[in-house]
Amino acid sequence: MGKRLLIVSTLDSSQPFGAFTRPFYLGQYLTEYFDVFQLGLDCSSVNYAPSVSIGSRSLKSYIQTLEKCIDEFCPDIVYAQETLPGLAALIVLKLRKSSKFSLVLDFHTFSPYEYWMRLFSVTNPFKEFTQCIKTYIAQGILIFSGSPIIAAGESIPKLIKQWYGIKPRQISCIGNGVTEDLLNTEIFPNKDPYQSFRPAKIVLLIAPKTFQFPTNDMSVSMTIEVAKYLQAHHHKVHFVVIGRDSSDISEPIPSNISFLGFLPKREDFVTHLKYADIALLPFSKQAVAGGARNKALDYFASRKLVVSTPEGLRGLEDFRHLEHLLVTGYSSEEVANTVLDAALNIDKYQSIVDTAYTLITEKYSWNAKAHNVAKILIEVSHS
């Protein structure tokens, strides 16, 4: 095996979605190029490489565990994903003058912009503003450190330029990918889990309850509003939300929407995704995510007709209205009308579903993304 790669991230096997997917799947495919070691919050699901679980989001815990891993694993490259692991890795690099490893940062998102955009739409704007300042300082330290950066979305370098007035000398954009079980059309379960809702077309929203970020909460609220608007068409359209229980919802729930909660078994999740007809990305202008939304890629890979607001496509610049999906306006009424049109004319839109799937298979497998990351890591280690 060649060079030794230590991936440090916030990977949390108890929440196998969102921020988990990028370090987990990149790590899996980077084993083809490096001797990999994973360091994260909970690495119990990492079965392809040695790993250590930190169990705490404190900077001190990350620094201490990282120092121990560097002593024992002796990495050539430390690949730090997200802000907290990046800061820990940078501190260790500066403290240990004798360290031989190269540091590469990975920005899943541009956090200050996310917090700023949500400032006037959350119940506690002071908390959001505090987080905006903290992340602005923290990501600024990483940006000005001079370490190479890999960004998960094309918008991230632009936002760095806007907010800090510089474009990092070494920054590359490599988005997220999709898993093989979604791309594999042979794996298709027999029983339709939505049989009781038929003949209605199933409109799916994946919105797990995630640590810290309320963008999924906003998407659930918009979906409820859209469902209310289409209650008279309940025989034609039924909404399903994965990742939330009805007990999580404080407002009245219309009869044409069901909440299935978190589906811990991967095969159950895939089954519900494969049998849905339409997939939703109902994000308002305030529901900003600085990197690509994993759920969008999952939808395209599963051959779903996707309905999205413009914000739902952040980080997915390759996908365009009427070529790969249906892009709607930001009002609940506009989203509802587009969903109803999609449900009534789903066969008419099959060609754009196929075009999106072709693009996903050619450019968005985790294997392809890992290959692109590996090229950058190898270049950095040789410089």
Image: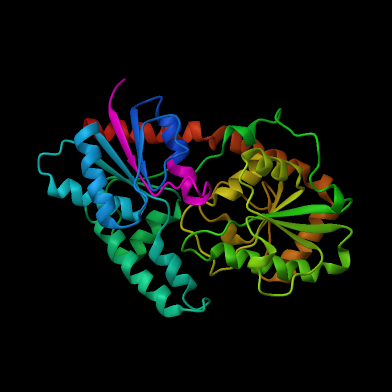
**Residue displayed at 31% across by 50% down:** 85
Tell me where residue 70 appears, x and y as whole percent.
22, 38
Q: In the figure, 102 relative to 319: above or below?
A: above
In this rendered view, identify the residue nearer to me: 328 or 226.
Answer: 226
Place residue 326 in its image quadrant: bottom right
334 relative to 256 in the view: left or right: left
172 relative to 290 in the view: left or right: left
Place residue 158 in its image quadrant: bottom left
The answer to whether any part of residue 146 appears in the image is no
The answer to whether any part of residue 148 appears in the image is yes
Q: Is residue 242 magenta?
A: no
Tell me where residue 239 appears, x and y as whole percent.
76, 58
38 relative to 92 in the view: left or right: right
**Residue displayed at 64% across by 36% down:** 182
Q: In the figure, 266 relative to 283: above or below?
A: above
> Where, quadrant-wise, is the C terminus in this rendering?
top left
Q: How many marks?
A: 0
Residue interval drawn in magenta: 1-23
81 relative to 15 in the view: left or right: left
